[in-house]
Image (spheres, grey):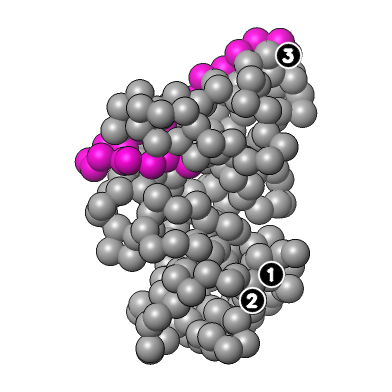
């Protein structure tokens, strides 16, 4: 079974509008972390935002926020006020475990294109 | 923030040769390093996890004799693709785990694009 699912292969958004990228996950581990990374065409992986399984509040980081619905096992990324530079691949990832020695499992990614 | 470098950034080699890719954590000690492979328009697939001073743990389906991983120090891990073939052409990315991440996140290198002719 897929542990991380991103159902949107591609998304379009108009500049300055908000967009939501979907991510669902599957784990039986009570301690896990959810990450979102951005990968521009250069290939580098840019860390955007993190949500821990025990965090009570949704994570926010500037224009990025994470809509964490634990019971539904979803961790959607919301980008507000989209900019042209937001055009990239976006990956959701899960870590089963509490620290960086545990491996990440990545979703298939969503390609976001911001239209001017 | 923590910086991870990879060298080379791009390599082209002939079929049958071996290629070594270096991954270095520049300003922190990486107790664990990870190697990923990414084919065009696909996601990152974990190949192996390496801990300093011990043998790497390979993911199912990854040939350990073909992809040799050495994590000799807390700042350096190497991936050697032995007897490379065109199907090994891919984007290889390393990441490092250490104490610097506020969220326990991994820090990624910029990647190495391997083309085997």
Q: Nearer the viewer, mark 2 or mark 3?
A: 2
From the viewer's side, name the closer residue of B104 and B94.
Answer: B104
Q: Which residue is located at x 64 percent, y 72 percent?
A: A26
Same subunit, labels 3 and 1: the answer reads no
Percent x, y for residue B93?
A: 52, 40
From the viewer's side, name the closer residue of B26 and B99.
Answer: B99
In the picture shown, does residue B1 fall above or below A113? above
Chain part drawn in magenta: B14-34
* Chain ID at mark 1: A
SS category of the residue bearing label 3: loop
For residue A78, the mark is none
The reply, left or right, for residue B85 in relation to residue B4 is: right
The reply, left or right, for residue B97 in relation to residue A115 is: left
Percent x, y for residue A110?
A: 66, 67
In the picture shown, does residue B64 fall above or below A44? above
Q: Tell me whether the residue at label 3 lies in contact with that at label 1, contact meaning CB atoms closer than 8 angstroms.
A: no
Q: Earlier in the sequence, mark 2 or mark 1?
A: 1
Q: Residues within 10 Å of mark 3 (few under 14, many from 20)?
A: some
Q: Tell me whether the residue at label 2 lies in contact with that at label 1, contact meaning CB atoms closer than 8 angstroms.
A: yes
For the N terminus of chain B, the quadrant is: bottom left
Q: Which residue is located at x 45 percent, y 53 percent?
A: A102
Asked whether residue B62 is in view, the answer is yes
SS category of the residue bearing label 2: strand
Percent x, y for residue A6?
A: 68, 70
Name the residue that disc number 2 marks.
A24
Name the residue that disc number 3 marks.
B15
Name the residue that disc number 1 marks.
A5
From the viewer's side, name the closer residue of A11 and B44.
Answer: B44
C-alpha span from label 2 to label 3: 40 Å
Residue B32 magenta-drawn? yes
Q: Which residue is at the far left?
A: B27
């Amino acid at each position: 079974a897929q542990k991380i699912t991103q159902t949107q292969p591609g998304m379009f958004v108009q500049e300055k509008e908000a967009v939501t990228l979907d991510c669902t996950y599957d784990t039986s581990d009570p301690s896990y972390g959810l990450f979102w990374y951005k990968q521009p065409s250069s290939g580098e992986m840019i860390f955007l935002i993190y949500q821990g399984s025990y965090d009570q509040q949704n994570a926010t980081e500037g224009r990025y926020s994470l809509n964490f619905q634990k019971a539904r096992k979803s961790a959607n990324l919301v980008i507000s006020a989209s900019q042209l530079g937001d055009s990239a691949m976006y990956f959701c990832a899960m870590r089963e475990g509490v620290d960086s020695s545990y491996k990440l499992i990545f979703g298939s990614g969503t390609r976001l294109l911001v239209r001017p | 923030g923590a910086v991870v470098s990879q060298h080379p950034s791009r390599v082209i080699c002939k079929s049958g040769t071996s290629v070594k890719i270096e991954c270095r954590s520049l300003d922190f000690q990486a107790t664990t390093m990870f190697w990923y492979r990414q084919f065009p328009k696909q996601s990152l697939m974990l190949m192996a996890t390496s801990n300093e001073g011990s043998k790497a743990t390979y993911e199912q389906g990854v040939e350990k004799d073909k992809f040799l991983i050495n994590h000799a120090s807390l700042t350096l891990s190497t991936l050697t693709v032995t007897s490379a073939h065109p199907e090994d052409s891919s984007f290889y990315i390393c990441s490092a785990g250490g104490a610097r991440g506020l969220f326990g996140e991994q820090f990624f290198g910029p990647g190495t694009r391997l083309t085997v002719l």
